[in-house]
Image: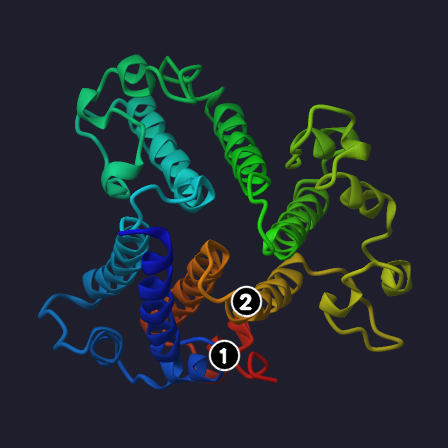
Amino acid sequence: MDKSGALAYIYAKASGSISKSFVESRTSKLFEAKSLGDLWTLLFKTPAPLIPEVLLAQEIEKEAFRRFINQYIDFISCFDHPDTFLSDQFFIYEVENLKEIGAALCAGETECPELVDLKGFSSLHTEKWPDIKAITAETEYSWYNKVPGKHEQQAMELKLDLQAYRHIWNSIHTVHDETRAGLINFFTEAFILKNSIWALRLKLYYNLPKEEIISKLIVVTDGSPSMDPIAGPVLKLLDKDVDKFDDWSDWKYSDFLNPYVPGNLWQIDPLWIEKKSKIYQNKKAVTLFHLYPLTSTSIVAWYKIKQFELGCIRTAVEALRLNVSAQDAMNVVGAGEIHG
């Protein structure tokens, strides 16, 4: 299909998909389900499989994810030659597949683990299992050519993550149409927020020194981290007092901070910031989708909106499985404030 025809077709399909998705004002509907069976029917419009609830919870998440991935693959398969940054969105999932393979081999497993099926959009030679060198041969991960030992697995996974984010960063910079500024701004903020939350977790939960935290941040350039567009804005956060609310008043994303009550003890909460940032990023993705209709950027915006929906579905599943109240579950994803 020629590019203009494919874009028109995909935008129409994506618009219809978003109107039925459980985002913005429709997010709360996920938490109205009284059972996992009800949630399955709400999501997939078919009766739930007759299986134990523990398995049904897993199947809901798997089916929602499978439909999301397959629809995105269907979209970009409409192009004779899709823009590179569209297929490069799969880089994160390909890295996750490689981490699963490495972990399985490290543990001595004899069967290949269940992987995300990326159809023809994966460069890994998974049919070569269990030969890790053959699996990654002639790919961007060819350096990952031996089974990691338990002591080096974490470092190798971090290297894969950093490679994935740098790859996506470079990919979006290949866009040179009218959507370029909006697309780069969206990913810049997303990566900065991800870095900020990760840095705070390392500081609060693991008490890591500043230099070690810096070494684990997403960096997308080869120079000093202080000059990096993604890591640079995060470095000054490492000197702030995590127990002093006023110390954070000049932070660009201070609106994402957990509430402070004068006279009460306060400590910054990365989970609260993460919740707020996901709501914020979803709203930005919705705006991006409508701002640039009939463009490849609108397809990436759809992809991000559906990723947000997946997170909400997982929260709804866990709430039902663990008998968490609907209100408490909605608070986790901020369902009451999403449409505000």
> Could you tell me if residue 325 is visible in this image?
no
Dot 1 lies on which element? helix
> Could you tell me if residue 240 is visible in this image?
yes
Q: In the picture, residue 210 is in which quadrant? A: top right
- Residue closest to the eye, 221 or 257: 221
Give the amino acid type for the residue marked by disc 2 in the picture. Asn
Asked if 196 appears above or below 13 in the picture, the reply is above
**Quadrant position of the C terminus in the picture:** bottom right
Q: Residue at x 40, y 16 (%)?
A: 142
Residue 316 at what x, y percent from top left?
Answer: 38, 72
Q: Are dots 1 and 2 in contact, CB under 8 Å?
A: yes
- Residue closest to the eye, 122 or 65: 122
Residue tagged by mark 1?
Answer: 24
Ranked by sequence position, the earlier of labels 1 and 2 is 1
Residue 170 at what x, y percent from top left?
Answer: 57, 35
Q: Residue at x 63, y 57 (%)?
A: 182
Left or right for 41, reference 160 = left
Q: In the picture, residue 131 is in which quadrant? A: top left
Residue tagged by mark 2?
Answer: 282
- Residue closest to the eye, 268 or 219: 219
Give the amino acid type for the residue marked by disc 1 in the picture. Glu
Asked if 168 appears above or below 308 in the picture, the reply is above
Q: Residue at x 34, y 71 (%)?
A: 12
Residue 304 at what x, y percent from top left?
Answer: 47, 59
Left or right for 85, reference 103 = right
Asked if 105 appears above or below 34 in the picture, the reply is above
Dot 2 lies on which element? helix
* CA neighbours of label 1 inside 10 A, class few (<14), some (14 to 19), many (20+): many
